[in-house]
Image (cartoon, coloured by chain):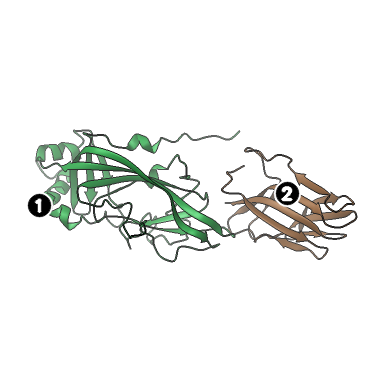
Amino acid sequence: MPSREELTPATATITIAGVNIGSPVPANHRRYIYYIQAENQFAGANVLQFLRTLVVMDHIGLGVAIGDMFANPDELKEDSLPLYIAEAAEQLNAITDAGDAFLRILYVDAP
Amino acid sequence: MQAVVEKKSHEDLWLQEGHLLALQFSEGWVCTRILGKEHSNVKPYVLSASLAAGGSLAAWNTLADAAARRYPEPPEEDYIHHYFWGVNKPKVRVYFQYQSRDDRNSLVEATRALGGDVGYVDGDMSPYNGPFSLKTEFISVFQIYPAVNLFNPLADAMPLVALNLDVMRYSYEIIKDPDTIRSILLGGRRARTYTVGGIDPSPVSIPNWLANIVSKDVLKWTKAVVRGETA
């Protein structure tokens, strides 16, 4: 994992309509996502899909209570490898199937 | 497992008392002997509170304080400034002009463009707390100083882009003995040589006050010595 100066946070409240997260990946760069945290804002089971442009990268299942949280990894270390990689010009987005969820990621853009 | 490249510390390149330093200007070489040294630094020097995505500074920055006194430029003729720097954002691209309006570090016939992929040093190469890249080395005399600009290649704004400048100030004496100058320039004596500014299109022009001390004839003669045209 690169240094803390490189880490960029992006947050969004994800809805069933789908929401973009952060900015598009710049040209000649890839986006390395090192940390993801999702928190259910819906009082019921909720599944969050995490996508790069139209490609689904992950499904995150959130429990029935508001505030149920998923975080990966538990502990971000200096030599952590990225969880997801998005390519140049792609846009990260997410969509839920039942209600709102709060999403936070930490990422680095690098050539 | 990541391979790690060990960098030589820039502090190994500070000159000591008694060392010889030869500065190449476009008119010729000025040979000096270092008499004394004193350390200083500027940390942080904030170049931008927020650098927009794809953005640069509104104007080239000469690294001056609030009273417009430029840190890289010695405040009087008696000193030489020797400095290295690092920047706190790994992907910010730092470009230089030396002197102002002379774009440096081009590669092909076209002059490198601000924001292009050519001719910059970024924070990955020279991080804020070191080790500083040796590419960041500058030596300046009175009335000679660089100008810096930035480019943010990312899609997100960079907050608080700052330099860490590590400076050694030297007092010096100009060497006028032709045999000593000749042995410095031809390698007979161990000396530090430095091209002020760069080579494309030419090194920085010598300031008038220094040209008057050294004399234009001596400067022209030093070029002939380097070319091997003198006995």
Name the chain letter of the residue that bears numbered label 2: A
- Image quadrant where residue B147 sits: bottom left
Q: Position of residue B8 (x, y in %)?
A: 41, 35
**Along the horizontal axis of the image, is A83 left or right of B65?**
right
Horizontal and vertical percent position of residue A13: 76, 60
Q: Is residue B122 visible?
A: yes
Query: Circle 1 sits on which residue?
Result: B217
- Note the chain letter of the green one: B
Q: Quadrant of the C terminus of chain B?
A: top left
Q: Quadrant of the N terminus of chain B?
A: top right
Chain in brown, by letter, is A
Give me the chain letter of mark 1: B
Task: Indicate which disc residue A37 carries.
Answer: none
Q: As displayed, is residue A56 above or below residue B128?
A: below
- Report the residue marked by disc 2: A36
Q: In this orientation, which residue lies closer to the viewer: B49 or A57? A: B49
Q: CA distance from mark 2 to mark 1?
A: 68 Å
Left-right relation of A60 to A111:
right
Q: How many marks?
A: 2
